Image: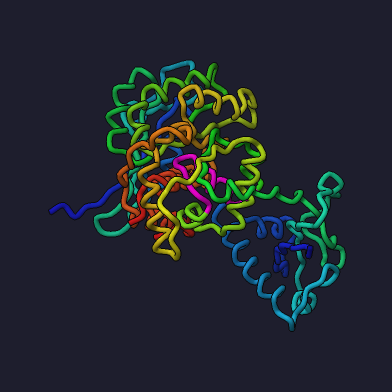
Amino acid sequence: MSPLAHWRIVNNTGLDDEARLNACMLARPIQFDALIDALSIVEKDILESPAAPVHEDTVPAALEAAPMHVALMSSVAATPTAAATPSFPLLLPLAQAPQAIPLQPQPPALPHAIAQSRVRLRRWPPADILHSSRHGLRLATFISARWLKIDELKLLSGIQTQDCSEFLARLHEAGLLAVQADTASPPAEGMSALVTAIRTDAASASPAVKPPAAPSEPRPPAPRPSASRGLLQALRIKLGLFRGAAS
Amino acid sequence: MNDRLDLKIVFTGTPGAGKTTAITALSDEPPVVTDVANTDVALAKSKTTVGLDYGRVSLGPGRGVRLFGTPGQVRFDFMWKILAADAFGIVILLDNSRPDPLSDLRLYLNTFKDALDRSACVVGVGRTESIPKPAIDEYIDVLSEFGLVLPVLAVDIRKREDVLVLVECVIALAEARADIE
């Protein structure tokens, strides 16, 4: 498995050490997540481009030539050896940057049966699980409020299926997920079908964040929208919050 | 025809938990506050809210989010339900340095029991770094007593980004509970 690395690029020209550190600090969740999203897209393009292959022990030539320092933020390696991870300074000259520092073990796989079922939080997750994914807070919030299948969670949250799946797997492993067998109408295809499925599921969502009902219990009545989605989206934009949710 | 479209978020919680601070961090304009000199020796602050705090985030002509802060002291609890009426979001702010913050949470959950059925609710706990006990897990236990699964987050309400995280949770809860339009 190829290691992935997130690089934070800092233009340090004319800055002393303290100013340079301050300059590279990003406030969560707005700037940090936006930057990581942008870098993920660039990284994907680089990895998929045959003209600019990236190997474990190399960096793109454009980065090497640039007059900048690179701070290694995180990387994922094939083996879960987080305990042996050495500490390293926040800012490193490129030549001194470690090649691949594993930070987290591989996420557990989400069982197929759960991936096909609606899930809901039994209990709010502890901080270590919540922060195991940069979207953990958002995903946990959604499934604290209603039963959702993974596709529905993706549609509502605007977060990629892979991220949803990995986070749900961690919750499942910790025993924090309640699972409800899908008793909805036969599956249809396409986005309209997914929306239909979520509309159907609205009839199964509880009117509040009550504990999950057992699968055999009748589904509580549908909640009515308590606020305009347009206003919520406008509020996200105004405050600079994550805007991945469907509008 | 009423062309105004407003949402309401209520910040409630114990005295000194940061309700006024949170509203100030979000409001477009300096908030309207009803702080007076504090005479309660149990509170380590010079002023305290006795009426309500009010701020607003404008989202364009006739559209916005109203932000209300409740008075913290229990003797003003008649204001709490009034302010929580029709709120789409309720943020409960607690202070871990209080004598019994878990009982504080129970008080607010009981008070807002009806509102929790229709509002998106989030719990923020302050001063957990200096006072680590009770742990966040113990707050989650209290919520379980009430049959609730709500976001519970350790926050430093002086940091705007922490306030935004709470608002983010409120919005996500509201989105989760709304049907797809």
Rendered position, B159 above or below A35: above
Rendered position, B70 above or below A146: above
- Residue lying at the far bottom of the rendered structure: A51
- Looking at the figure, which quarter contains the C terminus of chain B? bottom left
Residue B49 placement: quadrant: top left
- Residue lying at the far front of the rendered structure: A186
Left or right side of A159 for A88:
right
Whether residue A199 is visible to the viewer of this picture, yes or no, is yes
Whether residue B18 is visible to the viewer of this picture, yes or no, is no
Residue A33 placement: quadrant: bottom right
- Looking at the figure, which quarter contains the N terminus of chain B? bottom left
Q: What secondary structure predominates along the stretch shown in magenta?
A: helix
Left or right side of A140 for A229:
left
Q: Nearer the viewer, residue B178 or B163?
A: B178
Residue A140 belongs to the span the image colors magenta:
yes
Identify the residue at horizontal 69%, vertical 75% (top origin).
Answer: A48
State how the image is colored. rainbow
Q: Where is residue A223 in the image (x, y as percent from the top left)?
A: 33, 42
Question: Looking at the image, how many numbered discs can be counted on the residues?
Answer: 0
Magenta segment range? A133-150
Q: Where is residue B48 in the image (x, y as percent from the top left)?
A: 40, 27
